[in-house]
Image (cartoon, rainbow, N blue to C red):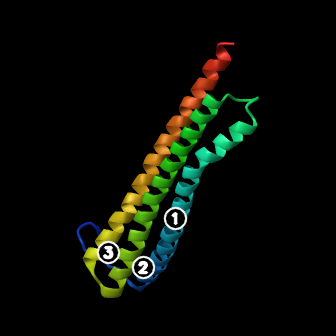
Amino acid sequence: MENTQNLLNNELQVDGNVRNHLNETAGWAKFLGIVGFIVSGLIGIGALFAGTFITTLSRSSTAYYGSSEMSAMSGMITVVYMILAVIGFFISLFTYKFGTKTKQALLTSDQDNLNAGMMNLKFIFRFYGIIMIIYIGILVLAVLASIFTAMSR
C-alpha cells in the first residue's frame, strides 16, 4: 500500500515519467504556438481585405443590399475578424511561452522557468474559460431572444 501524505505540506517531485510527459507536451505547445501565430496573421490579413472584397461584391449585387448596408456589414466583418485574430494571437503567445519556458526548465532544471511555464499554462486555461463564459452567455441570450420572438407572434 502506498504511503498517502498531504502533498501540500511536501515538495512535489518531477520524476522521469512526468519529465517525459512535460517535455513532449512542451514540444507540441511550441508547435501549436507557431502555427497559431501564422493562422492569426492570416486571419488579420484576411480581415484587412474583407472590407474590400465585400465592397466589390456589393457593387455587383446591389439588388439585394444597398451600398450603405454592405459597407456597414464589411466594417463589422473586419472588426470581428480582427478581434478573432487578436484572441488567437494571445492564445498562441501563451501556448508558445508555456512550451519554451517548460522545455528550458527541463533542460536546465530551472525552477523559475518551470514556474513561468506553468503560469502561462494557467493563462491559457483562464483565457479559454473566459471565452467559454462569453460564448455560453451569447447562446443564452440567443435562445431567450428566439423564445421572446416566437412568443410575440
User: Three-letter amino acid code at disc 3?
Assistant: Leu
Judge from the rendering whether residue 72 lies leftward or rightward of residue 97; answer left or right.
right
The 10 Å Cα crowd at callout 2, few under 14, some 14 to 19, many 20 or more, is few
Q: Quadrant of the N terminus?
A: bottom left
Q: Of the residues shown, which amino acid type is indicated by label 2?
A: Val
Which residue position is annotated with label 1?
36
> Which residue shows up at 76% across the image and 29% down it?
63
Q: Are marks 1 and 3 in contact (CB under 8 Å)?
A: no
Residue 30 percent coordinates (x, y): 47, 74
Is 140 placed above or below 116 here? above
**119 to the left or right of 59:** left
The answer to whether marks 3 and 2 mark residues whose Cβ atoms lie closer than 8 Å is no
Are circles 2 and 1 on residues that touch, CB within 8 Å? no
Mark 2 and mark 1: span between their CA atoms?
A: 26 Å
Quarter of the image where the C terminus is located? top right
Q: Please report whichever mark, 2 or 1, sits nearer to the chain's N-terminal start.
A: 2
Gap in Å between the C-alphas at discs 1 and 3?
Answer: 22 Å
Secondary element under disc 1, as helix, strand or loop, is: helix
* Residue hosting label 2: 18
